[in-house]
Amino acid sequence: MSRIDIPAIESPGGASANFRALAQDSIPARNPVVETILSRSAAKYYDPSFNLSDEQINELVRITTTAPTSFHLQNWRFIAVRTPEAKARLKPIAWNQPPITDAAVTFIICGQLADASVIPQRLAPLVQAGIMPATMVPEWENPARGLYAEYPQQQRDEAVRTGAIAATAMMYVARSWGLGSTPMIGFDAEALVREFALAEDEVPVMLVSIGAERPGNWPQKPRRPVPEVLDLV
């Protein structure tokens, strides 16, 4: 197997009706989104003969970037390490972990330091589409300046949050395509920044390998009981 067909998913036009049904009845035990979440686990073993085309990688990232970001900053960048040469550069930096070479692609998830000055540009398509009035843009930009401008730690925290949200979305998209994924924080961050020329405002949040799984991977591991992690107040 060397290619995968991306499933077509129609826009959920009946979302409001579904929500009303949910409110009137009970939470459905299963649906495709829940199944995707509950069946995902960190893959260790990949089929090295499987490849993703550049078109498929582009589509994966396009869907990933619909994930939320604060103030619509979209402060992320993705480096798709997919060629043998690029994998050879990354592998020693990533502690020689097998998914780097065996998976079809490993993404370097880069979070960008929060910068309020980009907000008018990022919101411009919303204004042009009639989603947001132009007069509302300063109402987003000014609070963001107050939150980030003089606070480097807040800028970095936002970069990490954004990258983590993107990585999570990417792994669930991959699972919905029938692919495995592996999030990794085991790498030399300074060496990665140098080797892959990350910008000064970019933080290497994590690596995410994606590809076709081969036998031997574990199912999803049991989690802590909900009462241990949930407080209802």
Image (tube, helix red, strand yellow):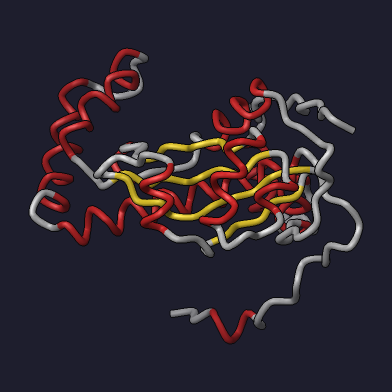
* Residue at figure coordinates x 20%, y 26% from the top left: 120
Going by the picture, which residue comes out furthest to the top?
Answer: 128
- In the visual, does 217 lie left or right of 85? right
Classify 161 as above or below 123.
below
Residue 177 percent coordinates (x, y): 77, 38
Q: In the rendered image, is residue 209 in sight? A: yes
Please give the count of numbered marks on the rendered protein. 0
Going by the picture, which residue comes out furthest to the bottom?
Answer: 228
Q: In the rendered image, is residue 26 in sight? A: no
Camera-side residue of 41 and 34: 41
Camera-side residue of 41 and 210: 210
- In the visual, does 223 lie left or right of 124? right
Residue 179 percent coordinates (x, y): 77, 44
Camera-side residue of 39 and 11: 39
User: What is the quadrant of residue 53 in the picture?
Assistant: top right
Classify 116 as above or below 231.
above
* Residue at figure coordinates x 16%, y 51% from the top left: 148
* Residue at figure coordinates x 78%, y 28% from the top left: 7
Quadrant of the rendering where the N terminus is positioned: top right
Quadrant of the rendering where the C terminus is positioned: bottom left
Residue 125 percent coordinates (x, y): 33, 18
- In the visual, does 131 lie left or right of 116? right
User: What is the quadrant of residue 63 in the picture?
Assistant: top right
* Residue at figure coordinates x 37%, y 14% from the top left: 129
- In the visual, does 223 lie left or right of 95? right
Residue 85 percent coordinates (x, y): 61, 36
